[in-house]
Image (cartoon, rainbow, N blue to C red):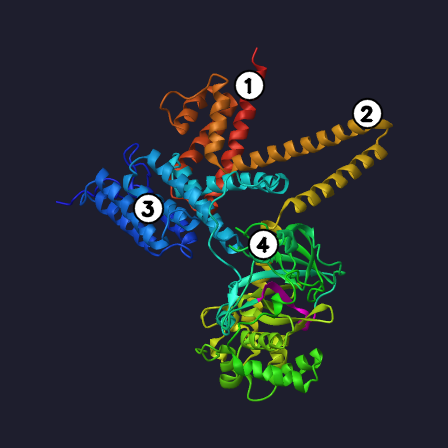
Amino acid sequence: MRRRPPAGLGPAPAVLADGRALSAAMLRQLFVGQCLVLALHLPWMPAWLAGLAVAVAGYRHLQLRRRLPRASLLLRLTAVGGLLAALWLEFGTLYGVDGLIGLLLGVYLLKLLETHDRRDARVVVMIGVVATSGAFLHDQGLLMAGAALLALGWLVQSLVWLSGASGARQAWRETAWLLGLSAPLMALLFVTFPRVGPLWNLPQVNRASTGLTDEIAPGDIAELSRSDARAFRARFEGREPSPHERYWRVYTLSHFDGVRWSRTAPRELSSVLGRPLDHFAREGQHTPWTDDAPRFTTELLLEPDSRPWRPSLGTPLASDSRQRFLADGTLEGLSPLGSRSLLRLASSGAAPSNPDPAGPAWQAMLPAEGNPRTRELAERLRRESGGDARAFLAAAMARFGEAPFRYTLSPPRLSSADRVDEFLFGSRAGYCTHYASAMAVLARAVGIPARIVVGFLGGEWHPDGHVTVRDYDAHAWVEVWLDGAWRRLDPTGVIAPERIEEGPQAIRDGREAFLADAPFSALRLRELGWANQLRLEWERLEYRWQRGVIGYQRASRAALMERVSERLRALWAWLIEVSPGRGILAAVATLLVTLGGLAGGAWLLWLGWRHHRRGRDERALLLVLQAWLARRGLGPAPGESPAAHLRRIAPRAGAAGPALEESARHIERLAYAPVGSAERRERQRRLARRVAEARRRLGRRKSSAP
């Protein structure tokens, strides 16, 4: 005897197999929605969440086949406890964006264990909508927007299906209508609704986009050549910098302990030196430290960063929002960046001209002992230069250009206590930090104030005019106090001028280290013409998306509203000019007539569209016809089919009878016969004509009745 399949697993397409209980088809629908939402988060969430989704779906599958009981309360509580423990082990805390998003996703997946009716299914779908929006906390790119739209479409379709749609095709059609009708309202709210700050703040994503830290030792920045992570993008208004001018300063390092250079924050300087904090940092939109004329105006599209640093092309002079201007010529935001943000910045393109308020002695300090051979070399170069600071610096820079010094992306590890000595007289191979550190120590050894500046050099130019700066563009150079101003010295330009002009990818020595941490990076295909063109085109589209959509801020909205107001004022002036009368009343009358004409035209178009749609949908056509007949006392009997209804009233319809009989035949053929698409369209047209004929003849009969 053939076994009957379990409830919900048969061929029936109905979503609700037994009233309110969910079928296997609807559970599959919910599971696919969970997979789509989870895929948005997997680049940042632990991969074991995918295993959790599969485990929950497998349990429900076996439960539907009567092989497992329904999940008990104890099992569900155990699953939630295990989820919390796993997230704690993964992130170390639940108080953070990653932990909270992981908890939301875990609850979303586990909810399927207790989903047995339509109410539970709707809760699952709505949690999915919230989880979809949470994906934008990590990324707001074009690819993420497209993937989120796909997931949202699937979730809306699930809601429509749960509401009683007859099948997947009808559910998708209604979903498309819902999304299409909501799109204009979404666009209107986007361009007109003012941006407001959050009512509460989540803990920031602990991610630093630049990969830089506030202390370095020789070799640290060399590690960044292994990464293609994007730091920021820039567009110049007016003059564009040449390659040797593209020094993006981020912060300065003034403290040297013999091994590492570190940054001293303004608050520490204030405490150590006993001076007010505003001697070292001030907030505002203009720098108070110098009155230099700006050479470059740059629009920066900054990546999310848990630190407040802001890159600047030379000394920052003014910005379009309040920032913290530091006396050492660097710039900080008032808070970390939780998402991509636009910043417009004017800068000098050169080292600061103002003295550091910490004083020259602070910038010339060295440990009492250490690196004796470097100190001896500095003293010898000073004597050979006759005590002239310029001649000394020129001699020290020239030394780096002599063999056997070489510039490499894979510098040897330095392990002695005298790292600078080991580099200058031992390995003589290094990256920008090796040369900058050695140059700064040589200058300080003879009393010349010097500091290291860490930031970026160069960037990739795109055909549409913007520059992309990545981790591998990280760079370090030296600034020395000379003749009443800070002067930039870059030993890299002596030892490896190709690094200045072409970027780190031009360095041959140690080339295997370049992009070593990004084996699948599209930048590896830049030598392949068509692949590189596709990459540049995609980055151009993404940049325009980020700048125009994500970067749509209060200033953009104000500019748009101003343009709309100007157009409306111009339209009002034109109405007054073309009005047959004079004054405001004539203009208002003309405006009302114009709007009335537009509304009438729109109404006629809508009527035509509705008539065309009815002609292609026999069900809508029959509903209209039966409602029209019911108003004339010829409505259908309870339980009567449309064809039987039309045949019953045809003998009493006079001249409309043949049209009603033929309409009944078309209805039965369309409803029950396997007709092709061409025959279906032809019969729909004939049915529409016969229905119109029947209404016309019945209308005449009623009007001629005494």
Q: Are marks 4 and 2 in contact (CB under 8 Å)?
A: no
Judging by the rendered image, the residue that carries numbered circle 4 is: 546
Judging by the rendered image, the residue that carries numbered circle 2 is: 585
Q: Indicate which label's residue lies in the foreground, 4 or 2.
A: 4
Residue placed at 50% from the left, 21% from the top? 654
Residue placed at 44% from the left, 20% from the top? 635
In whole angstroms, how far apart are the C-alphas of marks 4 and 3? Answer: 35 Å
Q: Is residue 98 left or right of residue 502?
A: left
Magenta span contains residue 54:
no
Q: Which mark is residue 701?
A: 1
In whole angstroms, how far apart are the C-alphas of marks 4 and 2? Answer: 46 Å
Q: Quick check: 417 above or below 333?
A: below
Residue type (three-letter) at the residue carrying disc 4? Gln
Question: Badge 4, how many Cα within 10 Å: few under 14, some, many 20+?
Answer: some
Question: Badge 1, how many Cα within 10 Å: few under 14, some, many 20+?
Answer: some
Q: Nearer the viewer, residue 605 or 594?
A: 594
Q: Where residue 81 sits in the image (x, y, percent)? A: 28, 45
Residue type (three-letter) at the residue carrying disc 2? Leu
Q: Which residues are magenta?
A: 242-254
Question: Badge 2, how many Cα within 10 Å: few under 14, some, many 20+?
Answer: few
In whole angstroms, how far apart are the C-alphas of marks 1 and 4? Answer: 66 Å
Q: Are marks 1 and 3 in contact (CB under 8 Å)?
A: no
Judging by the rendered image, the residue that carries numbered circle 3 is: 28
Q: Are marks 1 and 4 in contact (CB under 8 Å)?
A: no
